Amino acid sequence: MSKENVTIAYALYRVSTKGQVDRVKDDIPMQREACHEFADRMGWTIGKEFLEKGVSGFKVSAKDRDAIQDLKDAALKGEFQILLVFMFDRIGRIDDETPFIVEWFAKHGIKVWSVQEGEQRFESHVDKLMNYIRFWQAAGESEKTSMRIKTRMQQLTAEGIYRGGPVPFGYMLENRGRLNKKGKPSFDLAVNPEEAEIVKIIFDKTVKDGYGSFRIAHMLNDMGIKTHNKSKFQSNTVLRILRNRLYCGYMVSGETVSPQLMDLQIVDEKIFEQAQFILDEREQANEEKRRIALTTRSESLLSGIMFCAHCGGRMTSIVHTDRRKRADGSLYELRREKYLCYHNSRRLCECDGQCSYLAYKVDDAVCKAVTEMFKSIKDAPDETVLKKHFTKEMQSFKAKQTKIKHDLSKLEKQQEKLEAELPKTLTGESVYSPEMLSKAIKAVETQIAEQQENLDTLSIEMTEKRSSMEKIKPLYDSFKGWSEEFGDCTTEQKKMIISQIIDRIEVSRGYKVNLELNMTYQQFCESWDTLNS
């Protein structure tokens, strides 16, 4: 056969997942063998073969697929006459894109053939419609497959079953005898005791000492601790750990959350929520709204969480060295921590406040105010006494409620009797005159309204007490603990405690300090007052 009469076919093979490469059905070796046999029957010569492994024809656009782009270039150069695939969906499964790719090759003189489905022609409107319908069906099948996989993943999550993938730090895989559909072992997650202790340290350093992710990563690397892939810890590694609810015992997949799995819990939920609050605050785009210091590394107690009362700018901490001369003429240096108004020092605005403040004076004033706030909580009864007092209050409320309902029932019966007399007054059979009866009924109605109002008021009071107790429960332990340990805390721990109960600290001339309590602490105080009222 002369060279001019040889029909050159370029073949395209694709599998959407890497796992299909070695499978019997629809894998690349099978596609290749089928295409070669078909080309031999048709008298074609396969020139080049294009392989795509692990490329989704449903998710990846043709413009991002090198094989499709190379085939288009070769078509424009006239290198081949036939584009051969095992099935047309190997070209793609995107319903609003793939039909037009097939049509593009046809318009450029390339015949598109499938081993299973024959040639795709474009000689009539019916051909074009069939071309579109074919890929619309293929896209639908991909969507159904994707939905089935997603649904099954959600079901596994809801059942608390490990779905595979990288094992989070703090856990390991354990064979508990569970088998998959193929009869092979399915491993379950289990807590790795040694790594779990490291996870607890990461959360403690974040919540109690205010360490940032970079500082924690540096600390772990200095301790010689490695990740599961034997790498050093990075900032984003630490952040992933701090954001993962699995450490509270919950498996999460999108919106699906499993019941709490106590055997997988490493971190207390209250510690986890505090960590989320700190991370969220540090992610604030507007630093004026941020309440948690970006770092607690500074020796100054209020570094990063204090503002100038005059211009509203954030105060920064500096170490200033004063050089003084003694009476005998010798020199000495006095090292002092100071808070500096950045706007004032850089002349960024007309700030009429002091440029700097001695740190120890401001720190002492704030600590004194915080200690005073904690005093009432420190002397408060423990949770058991608090619950006992709450239960007693509820019993008292219920007793009052029962009495009011009883009185209300008697009044309602009395009202019924009086209203039953109404027909008799019309016939003159009643001992009451119409005027007397009307007056008696109105008096009873007034008493019923009063008792009903008392009952409603009591219900509102009970609801408020119950609501206050529910609000105070998650806050009680934290505030009680802080009040007891505040005096002996490190500077880093004091800074974290202060930043979680105070929204804003402002300092003005003459070392006047103004503290704005955050809503959480205000809510606690209001609930506390309600419970003790």
Image (spheres, rainbow, N blue to C red):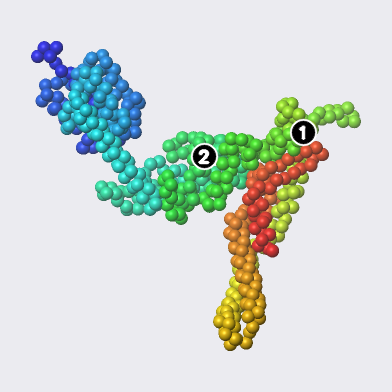
What element does badge 1 sit on?
strand
Q: Residues within 10 Å of mark 1 (few under 14, many from 20)?
A: some
Quadrant including the N terminus: top left
What element does badge 2 sit on?
helix
- Residue drawn at (31%, 40%), measured in percent from left and top? 143
Quadrant including the C terminus: bottom right
Residue 2 at what x, y percent from top left? 11, 12
Identify whether 119 is placed above or below 299.
above
Residue 3 at what x, y percent from top left? 14, 12
Foreground pick, 243 / 404: 404
Q: Residue furthest right?
A: 327
- Residue drawn at (28%, 30%), measured in percent from left and top? 92
Identify whether 329 is placed above or below 252.
above
Which tag, 2 or 1, sits closer to the chain's start? 2
Identify whether 76 is placed above or below 392.
above
Residue 110 at what x, y percent from top left? 21, 20
Report the Cα–Cα distance between label 2 and label 1: 35 Å
Question: In the rendered structure, which amino acid carries the disc numbered 1?
Answer: Ser
Residue receiving disc 1: 356
Residue 126 falls in image quadrant: top left
- Residue drawn at (17%, 32%), measured in percent from left and top? 117
Foreground pick, 36 / 459: 459
- Is residue 146 in sight in this rendering? yes
Q: Residue furthest front?
A: 427
Q: Is residue 218 left or right of residue 443?
A: left
Looking at the rendered structure, which numbered label has been put on residue 239?
A: 2
Question: In the rendered structure, which amino acid carries the disc numbered 2?
Answer: Leu
Residue 84 falls in image quadrant: top left
Cβ–Cβ below 8 Å for labels 2 and 1? no
Q: Is residue 507 left or right of residue 418?
A: right
